[in-house]
Amino acid sequence: MLHDFSPSVDFPGEPEPDACCFVYAESRLLVKTTGAAPEIPSFCEVASQGIDLSHPLFLGRCRGRACYAVPSATRREAIPGAEFCELRTLFSRLADPWYDIALRGLHLAGWDGACRFCSRCATPLQARTDIRAKECPACGRLEFPRISPAVIMLVEKDDTLLLARSPRFKSEMWSVLAGFVEPGESLEDAVRREVQEETGIAVKDIAYFGSQPWPFPDSLMIGFTARYASGEIKIDGDEICEAGWFRADNLPPIPGRLSIARRLIDSFLKKHPAASSS
Ligand SMILES: [Zn+2]
């Protein structure tokens, strides 16, 4: 929840020395490691590390402090009292609300670096200061940060849930199904299509569950629950290499607590308290 955070694009001028500085090297974030828990360094602490701060991206204010995202070209692992950590590994280690701001910063820093020229006429874009967008000075085209919606769904059948394993998963992990929304589809259409395509199962009673920003690099995960309607499991063999119905007391390895996938699975386990949880 971004309860203490006020997003803004109204660049306040020269950053104050105590401004929060979210420095990224790809999906890694620079954090101070001198305290008991990782912390976001201030602008002057980052400046003292020799990191280029000439193009900070203003994110907004949190608890009175300005927050900036700074993409860094540095690959240095050794910075005194600080290190670049994979953002996913900082979940539950970086205190609220800083983790959520870090996710937002990662998404915007990625967009800022990748979206530099007009996609219609190739003129270098200029940042707008009134809305979160860039504008082409030649043809006037506006480029907004790209957000790619993806649906993720828990499918239930009696006291079991549908889990699948992707060949893309590094480990023997099973999860709920997910996929990107296609142009012209409603979210419910996307849920029906993805489950059908990947497992051959038809679903009904599709209901909204919740959502989660997932800036790796630019997704918004939109969670649903659904119930089995008909069909037998028939995997596509491409995106999915195994799928099956699992009872709460017989689950395979499932995703960690960072993801909405786990929140969906946990909601199922709550309804079926015979569950063991890993
Ligand atoms: Zn243009």
Image (cartoon, grey):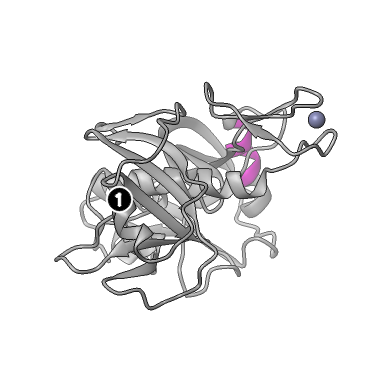
Residue beneath the point at 58% across and 31% down? 187
Q: Specify the segment rendered in magenta.
A: 188-195
In the displayed structure image, the side of residue 270 where residue 256 appears, left or right? right
Residue beneath the point at 45% across and 69% down? 173
Magenta span has 18?
Answer: no
Crowd rating for badge 1 (residues with CA inside 10 Å; few <14, some 14–19, many 20+): some
Residue beneath the point at 22% across and 51% down? 95
Please state the quadrant of the image where ligand 1 appears. top right
Specify the quadrant of the image occupied by residue 145.
Answer: top right
Whether residue 54 is situated above or below residue 150 in the rendered picture: below
Q: Position of residue 265 (x, y in %)?
A: 36, 51
Whether residue 274 is situated above or below residue 190 in the rendered picture: below
Observer able to see residue 155: no
Q: Position of residue 178 (x, y in %)?
A: 55, 49
Q: Main secondary structure of the magenta part?
A: helix
Q: Which residue is mark 1?
A: 266
Q: Residue furthest bottom?
A: 78
Closer-to-camera residue (27/135): 135
Magenta span has 189?
Answer: yes
